[in-house]
Every structure is written in structure tokens, then in C-alpha cells.
Image (cartoon, rainbow, N blue to C red):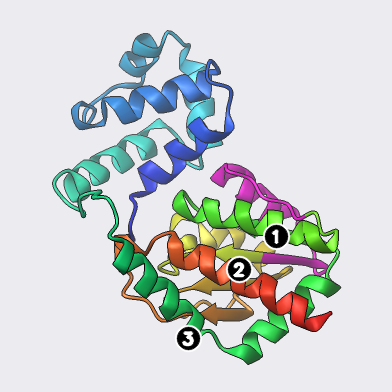
Amino acid sequence: MLYSKLEVVLLSVIASKPQDSQDAVLATYLLEHVDALDDVTIQALADHCHVGLGSVSRFCRHIGFQDFFELRACIQTHNTRYRNDGEKNNVPDPAVIERVVRQVDESLDPIQLEKLARNLKTYRKIAVFGLLKGQAACLAFAQEMLAWQKVVYTNLSLFEQIEYFKKADENTLVVVFSYTGSYFDYVDVRSLRAALERPKIWMVSGCRKPLDFVDEWLVFNSDLQAAGHPYQLLRAGENIAAWMKKED
């Protein structure tokens, strides 16, 4: 996992909510002060953000936690695992980008590309989902689909993505762009199990995982390093769009 769950849920709130909304204010405060919040109380958080206790409780549920205590446990886990971990965000080397993009072009299975292209043309209800940098690939791919008058649904909010899965039916196609294949690590799969069985789910990824509710995989060779993200997902989306042109 390149990201902690805390980063994913809080950044998705900031990206999808009005800047002055209570949810965005709470998410911003938590990210700015996360290192000092291991033992924060719900009252202290409410006071710092100038909101009521009920607003904090609703915020916790909105971002997928049962209550404030589960959120605080996530903060503590984040600080233990990620405080001094991870790669530095250096400027990517153009040669590295060229290499990882070429990896995608040379490794995608044409049989799977053809199958996904046909699904995209057949299904009327289509959604494309990803997390953080993966969302860049989703937005770019949604724009590519306009060439076929396909308006696909996407949303920056992880909460809204989960809600979409809950309402999806067997006539829905969901394409998940997940660099390391870990998208569902951020989701409570147990509570969503029945919902995940209904739509057809494709995973576009550099790593295949044993997920029985994912119907199809489009996998590319990848070192799974930060330097290749999101360039490989973006290139995979371009390859899918190019294959759809072949199908015309």
C-alpha cells in the first residue's frame, strides 16, 4: 500500500467537499496536525475546529468509520507506520517515466484489452474509480470515453465510490484503476460483499491479487515503485482507448 488509509479518506474529503464545509475543515485539521493527535479527544477536536460533537460523529461516519474511537485508532496506526516511512517525493526522472510507460505498452494482454473494450461499448452504466493519484487516471479515462459518447461516472470521494457500489446492479460495469491492486484494502469488503457481487468489476493494475469478486484483470508489468505512479495507470487507460478504436 502506497498510502495510509487516513491519507486516502481525508484527502478524498478535501478534494470533493466545499472548502468551508465542516467535513473539509475537520479533514484539513486532522492532516495538518496528525502527528500530535494520538490521544486527541472528540471534545478537543470539536473545539479546535469550532464544530459540535455531533458534527465530529457524523464526519467519522461519512468517511467510513463507525465512530470517533475507530478514527483515532486509525490516526495512531498511521503515525506508527508512516511517520518516518515511504519514499521521498523527488521529481521523477524522465528516463524512468519512459521506461515504465514502455513496460505497460509491452505487457498488456491483447485478449484482455479486447474483452474490456467490448465491455465498455456494451454496458450503458459505467463507473471508473481509483484513489489519490489513481484518480488522475480515472478522470483522464472518463475524458477518453467521450469519443464514444460514453459518459462514465467517477467521483473523488471514497465514501461516494462505496455508495455507488452499494447501489450498483448486474447491468453496471465498474473499472478500478489501482496501481498496486490494493484499492479494496481501503474498503470494508465484509460489509460490501453482497454489493460487490452484483456489478461486473475490472481491475487495471500492476499487481494481481486474489479477489474473487473482481471479475476480470488487466495487468501490466510494474516495479510498483512510486516513480511509476500514476504514469503506468494513465498509459493503461490510453491503451484501452486505443483498443476501442481498433474495435470500431
| Nearer-N-terminus badge (1/2) | 1
Secondary structure at badge 1 equals helix
Residue toward you, 56 or 232 = 232
The span from disc 1 to disc 3 (Cα, nearest Å) is 21 Å
**On-image quarter of the N terminus:** bottom left
Residue kind at label 1, given as amino acid type: Glu
The span from disc 1 to disc 2 (Cα, nearest Å) is 8 Å
Q: Can you say whether 113 is above or below 25 in the image?
A: below
Q: Can you say whether 11 is above or below 201 in the image?
A: above
Is the Cβ of the residue at disc 1 closer than 8 Å to that at disc 2? yes
Q: Is residue 95 rendered to the left or right of residue 214?
A: left
Point 51% across, 42% down: residue: 64
Question: Residue 205: x and y, percent?
Answer: 48, 72
Q: Which residue is mark 1?
A: 144
Question: Residue 131: x and y, percent?
Answer: 49, 52
Q: Quadrant of residue 155?
A: top right
Q: Is residue 87 rendered to the left or right of residue 213?
A: left
Is the Cβ of the residue at disc 2 closer than 8 Å to that at disc 3? no
Q: Which residue is mark 2?
A: 238
Secondary structure at badge 2 equals helix
Question: Residue 23: x and y, percent?
Answer: 51, 24
Residue kind at label 2, given as amino acid type: Glu
Residue kind at label 3, given as amino acid type: Glu
In magenta, the rendered stretch is 152-174
Badge 1 crowding class, 10 Å Cα cut-off, few under 14, some 14 to 19, many 20 or more, is some
| Nearer-N-terminus badge (2/3) | 3
Is the Cβ of the residue at disc 1 closer than 8 Å to that at disc 3? no
Q: Which residue is mark 3?
A: 106
Point 76% across, 76% down: residue: 245
Residue toward you, 93 or 153 = 93
